[in-house]
Amino acid sequence: NAGVMQNPRHLVRRRGQEARLRCSPMKGHSHVYWYRQLPEEGLKFMVYLQKENIIDESGMPKERFSAEFPKEGPSILRIQQVVRGDSAAYFCASSHIPTTGANVLTFGAGSRLTVL
Amino acid sequence: SQELEQSPQSLIVQEGKNLTINCTSSKTLYGLYWYKQKYGEGLIFLMMLQKGGEEKSHEKITAKLDEKKQQSSLHITASQPSHAGIYLCGAVNNAGNMLTFGGGTRLMVKP
């Protein structure tokens, strides 16, 4: 079991370009979470998805950010027209069932986005 | 929304010393998770606490959840350089569908 796989590990974009971050959950996990960590800060929840459904996107910026978790393939976090403030580490986590207090989220190693 | 405050925000200790990190919640905790993040890497699960008064240990790390379930502490005994990193507490929300994290405590252990 390879764990939660994120790619790319590092991504450099110029302002105005698009960034696509991918996350393959652990085998058998159908719940995916995206978090953002700004430099020197904690993790901020962005979005929670199940296969083909967005369950909670209360942490997603209203514009330029979108996420999907298709029936086949990895979950994708897409940032359009990136700005310098989008520079951060983006972490994906997955679980077998919702985190009801007895289930552990398994995190990927993160994708570090740098916007020039 | 639930907010978690961690203290201290950063900590430098001499190798071999004990230390404690605190996590205080604005609301009752339904599940409290401790994770460790090595600098520049992902999060590693340490422990999860659910019951008031619960205490768990793993190697030299002990975590407790107070009786009122609004505060947790993480205690490291005889710290080593390998303990260095960022310690994050996370709380399950009411709906049970996501974790909210504290701001983290950055620990450095001087050899």
Image: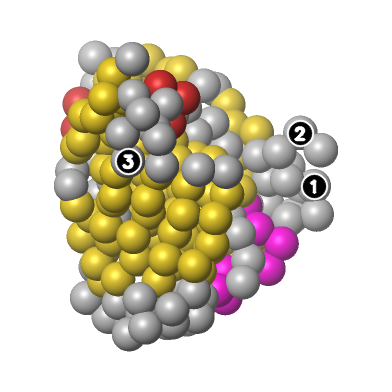
Q: Quadrant of the N terminus of chain A?
A: top right
Amino acid at pointer 2 = Ala
Mark 3–mark 1 distance (CA, rounded to whole Å): 38 Å
A72 falls in the magenta region: no
Would you call the spot at circle 1 few (<14 residues within 10 Å), some (14-19), or many (20 or more)? few
> Is residue A93 toward the left or the right of residue A59 in the image?
right
> Is residue B72 toward the left or the right of residue B51 in the image?
left
Would you call the spot at circle 2 few (<14 residues within 10 Å), some (14-19), or many (20 or more)? few
Amino acid at pointer 3 = Asn
Task: Please name the residue shown 49% across and 74% down the image.
Answer: B54
Mark 2–mark 3 distance (CA, rounded to whole Å): 35 Å
* Discs 1 and 2 lie in a common subunit: yes
- Circle on res. A2: 2
- Residue A47: percent from the left, percent from the top? 44, 57
Residue A16: quarter of image: top left
- Bounds of the magenta span? A91-101
- Circle on res. B79: none
Task: Please name the residue shown 35% across and 76% down the image.
Answer: B66
| Relative vertical location of residue A8 with respect to residue A38 in this rendering, above or below | above
Q: Secondary structure at mark 1?
A: loop
Give the mark nearest the N terminus, 1 or 2. 2
Q: Chain of mark 1?
A: A
Would you call the spot at circle 3 few (<14 residues within 10 Å), some (14-19), or many (20 or more)? some
- Circle on res. A27: 1
Amino acid at pointer 1 = Lys
- Circle on res. B18: 3
